[in-house]
């Protein structure tokens, strides 16, 4: 059967479950890209449509496709800008102001696994947890916006989704937009490009009761995005909609954040998540092993909790690796395995490196001065080491592009992005560059 025909069948199947208006409005003009049930791709004309469909209709569409193809199907909506043939009727309906279709499924962009039930509360995250709980239970009108900040892998995304999931459970009709700030940015760029800003604005303003924006730090330094977000924010805020924002930086630390946005963020409540204490880490391990049915001896759990301190994602990752190792080798988990896993995990630069350390090592390696890296000098002798140093700062110090820019004598973030991309690409083809990177990293780890 050709793909078109199969897509029609899927739509037919879907219309048994959704209103025909929803199907017309959201599904016409889409295209099936392949027929691989492991990863069935449906193309949409833009990022917003993809995000929306992924968050509202992914499971349902997957199920419909499964029925048609006779197997279990993994399905995703992916934007393909070449696909601009948006159905006229649907477009007209939208411009006449029909709102989003009635929703009866969990928005799947909300991760259903991230709930309050499986969030371990301890002194390090108690405040953030309590604030999220209060917002989700609608008691806290003045906790708006709620701004959650904390280091990488400490549970921001988990809490954000927990709020969304609970709100959704209590009221499935609530229009919840859960989105990475980066998708907001991409969607905006695309909408500008396609001259669809009116629609973009309506999507984020009119069709939204709750805005959950993850990782807002990436909009620092991006003026147009900040401006757009500012207006969206004001619109929702003055309409009394809930807004929750996460960030790995405190508003004051985001040096290139516009003042008016900063003061908006600070006008609600700001809560932080700190790295968990030993007891919380241990409780998280127990929680996870129980949930995933992993058999991990107590002393190994304690060993991991003692040694992986600053990142819960790594803690979880090490559990998974450990049980994989044990089942692959066919022997029960022992301390030796745990030690080897730990070494691997900590090789991922558990300790945050400072950009100064990176610059010192890079300049020593190339026999130039640190000030040369920060200077505007444009000879090749300096340019390549500088690009390498920026690349390593991104990789090892987990700094944002604007932060790297300011560490390198106040350069613009777009220069940094360019450098990081260039090295990232070139290292695959240049043996020499690869060797440089390896030697410098070895030196840094010593
Ligand atoms: P962040 O968004 O802050 O980088 P995440 O929310 O993605 O971090 O959390 C990383 C992982 O750690 C997720 O799998 C999450 O479920 C888990 N996690 C974080 N904090 C907790 C907690 N307090 N209890 C249980 N799991 C947690
Ligand atoms: Mg996150």
Image (cartoon, helix red, strand yellow):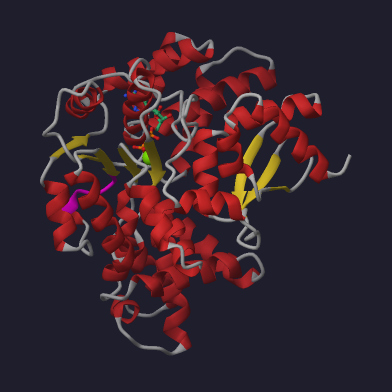
Left or right of 9 in this view: 241? left
The answer to which quarter of the image holds residue 189 is bottom left
Comparing 210 with 9, the one in front is: 9
> What residue is drawn where x is 47% and y is 58%?
441
Residue sticking out furthest to the right = 1
Q: Position of residue 297 (x, y in %)?
A: 48, 9
Q: Is residue 250 magenta?
A: yes
Q: Position of residue 282 (x, y in %)?
A: 34, 17
Q: Is residue 139 visible?
A: yes
> What residue is drawn where x is 60% and y is 33%?
20
Comparing 419 with 432, the one in front is: 419
Which segment is the magenta one? Answer: 247-251
Q: Position of residue 118 (x, y in %)?
A: 37, 17
Q: Where is 304 relative to 186, above or below?
A: above
Q: Where is residue 143 in the image (x, y as percent from the top left)?
A: 14, 34
> What residue is drawn where x is 86% and y is 44%?
2
Looking at the rendered image, the quarter that the N terminus falls into is top right
The answer to which quarter of the image holds residue 17 is top right
Q: In which quarter of the image is ligand 2?
A: top left
> What residue is drawn where x is 43% and y is 68%?
417
Number of callouts in the render? 0
Left or right of 30 in this view: 264? left
Q: Where is 269 relative to 43, above or below?
A: above
Q: Can residue 310 be seen in this view?
A: no
Comparing 431 with 10, the one in front is: 10
């Amino acid at each position: 059967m050709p793909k078109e025909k199969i897509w029609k069948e899927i739509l037919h199947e879907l219309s048994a479950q959704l209103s025909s208006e929803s199907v017309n409005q959201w599904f016409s003009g889409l295209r099936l890209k392949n027929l691989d049930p492991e990863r069935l791709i449906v193309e949409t004309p833009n990022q917003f449509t993809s995000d929306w469909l992924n968050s509202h209709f992914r499971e349902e569409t997957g199920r419909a496709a499964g029925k048609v193809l006779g197997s279990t199907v993994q399905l995703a909506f992916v934007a393909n800008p070449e696909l601009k043939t948006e159905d006229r009727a649907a477009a007209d309906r939208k411009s006449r102001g029909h709102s989003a279709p009635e929703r009866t499924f969990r928005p799947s962009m909300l991760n259903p696994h991230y709930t309050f039930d499986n969030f371990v509360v301890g002194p390090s995250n108690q405040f953030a947890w309590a604030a999220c709980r209060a917002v989700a239970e609608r008691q806290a009108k003045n906790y708006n916006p709620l701004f959650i900040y904390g280091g990488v892998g400490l549970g921001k995304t988990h809490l954000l989704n927990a709020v969304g999931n609970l709100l959704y459970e209590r009221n499935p009709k609530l229009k919840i937009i859960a989105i990475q700030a980066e998708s907001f940015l991409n969607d905006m760029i695309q909408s500008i490009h396609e001259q669809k800003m009116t629609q973009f604005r309506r999507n984020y303003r009119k069709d939204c009761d709750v805005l959950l924006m993850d990782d807002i730090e990436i909009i620092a330094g991006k003026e147009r995005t900040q401006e757009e977000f500012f207006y969206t924010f004001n619109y929702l805020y003055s309409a009394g909609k809930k807004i929750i924002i996460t960030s790995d930086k405190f508003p004051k630390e985001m040096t290139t954040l516009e003042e008016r946005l900063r003061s908006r963020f600070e006008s609600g409540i700001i809560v932080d998540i700190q790295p968990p204490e030993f007891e919380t880490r241990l409780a998280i391990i127990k929680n996870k092993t129980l949930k995933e049915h992993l058999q991990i001896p107590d002393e190994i759990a304690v060993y991991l909790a003692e040694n992986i301190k600053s990142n819960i994602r790594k803690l979880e990752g090490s559990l998974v690796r450990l049980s994989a190792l044990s089942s692959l080798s066919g022997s029960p988990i022992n301390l030796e395995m745990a030690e080897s896993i730990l070494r691997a995990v900590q090789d991922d630069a558990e300790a945050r490196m400072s950009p100064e350390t990176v610059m010192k090592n890079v300049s020593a390696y190339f026999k130039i001065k640190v000030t040369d890296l920060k200077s505007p000098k444009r000879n090749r002798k300096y340019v390549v080491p500088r690009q390498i140093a920026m690349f390593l700062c991104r990789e090892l110090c987990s700094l944002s592009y604007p932060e790297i820019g300011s560490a390198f004598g106040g350069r613009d973030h777009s220069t940094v992005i360019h450098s990081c991309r260039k090295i990232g690409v070139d290292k695959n083809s240049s043996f020499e560059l690869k060797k440089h990177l390896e030697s410098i990293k070895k030196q840094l780890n010593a």
